[in-house]
Amino acid sequence: MSRRQPQASISHDEAIIEELRADREFAIAYLQAALEELDDADNRAAGLLALRDIAEAYGGMAVVARDAGITREALYRALSPKGNPTLKTLLAVLHAMDMRLSVTTGRTQGLTPPQGNTCRPA
């Protein structure tokens, strides 16, 4: 009777990071979903942890932090479940991963823009 050797396994997090590293389109879709989660206070932690996964895939936290011009510790804090990154930090991290922030319409359809000069500087 032969004994089968157990196959090496990797954690779910490691598998996600490998997939993000291997497939840029998947990484972009993953990031888009993460950013949508940041807009929902109940799911913000999931969005921040997804951003951390992407940072790990794109060189690791130390490299992304260095390229973003922040400390590794600050990046870990910003992308922790209770993190609250500033827009400056978020943009720097995305830039370090050669990605950009974009805007799309929200869930509400049919809104009309405000009338008058409310959006123009005086």
Image (cartoon, rainbow, N blue to C red):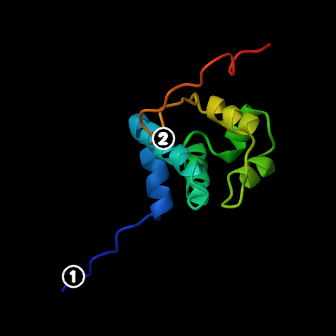
Residue highlighted by disc 1: 2
Q: Is residue 35 above or below residue 95?
A: below
Earlier along the polypeptide chain: callout 2 or callout 1?
1
Q: Is residue 113 above or below residue 48?
A: above
Question: Left or right of 18: which side holds 82?
Answer: right
Q: Position of residue 36 (x, y in %)?
A: 51, 46
Choose between 87 and 21: the one closer to the eye: 87
Of all residues, the one furthest to the bottom in this rendering is 1
Residue type, label 1 = Ser
Question: What secondary structure is found at the residue carrying circle 2?
Answer: helix
Estimate the spatial distance between the alpha carbons at disc 2 and disc 1, rounded to whole Å.
48 Å
Residue type, label 2 = Gln
Q: Residue at x 71, y 44 (%)?
A: 62
Residue highlighted by disc 2: 32
Res. 21 visible in picture = no
Q: Residue at x 42, y 36 (%)?
A: 109
Q: Residue at x 74, y 47 (%)?
A: 75
Residue 81: which numbered mark, if any? Answer: none
Q: Position of residue 42 (x, y in %)?
A: 58, 62
Looking at the figure, which quarter contains the C terminus? top right
Residue 9, picture quadrant: bottom left
Neighbourhood count class around disc 1 (C-alpha, 10 Å): few under 14, some 14–19, many 20 upward: few
Neighbourhood count class around disc 2 (C-alpha, 10 Å): few under 14, some 14–19, many 20 upward: some
Residue 90, picture quadrant: top right
Choose between 80 and 44: the one closer to the eye: 44
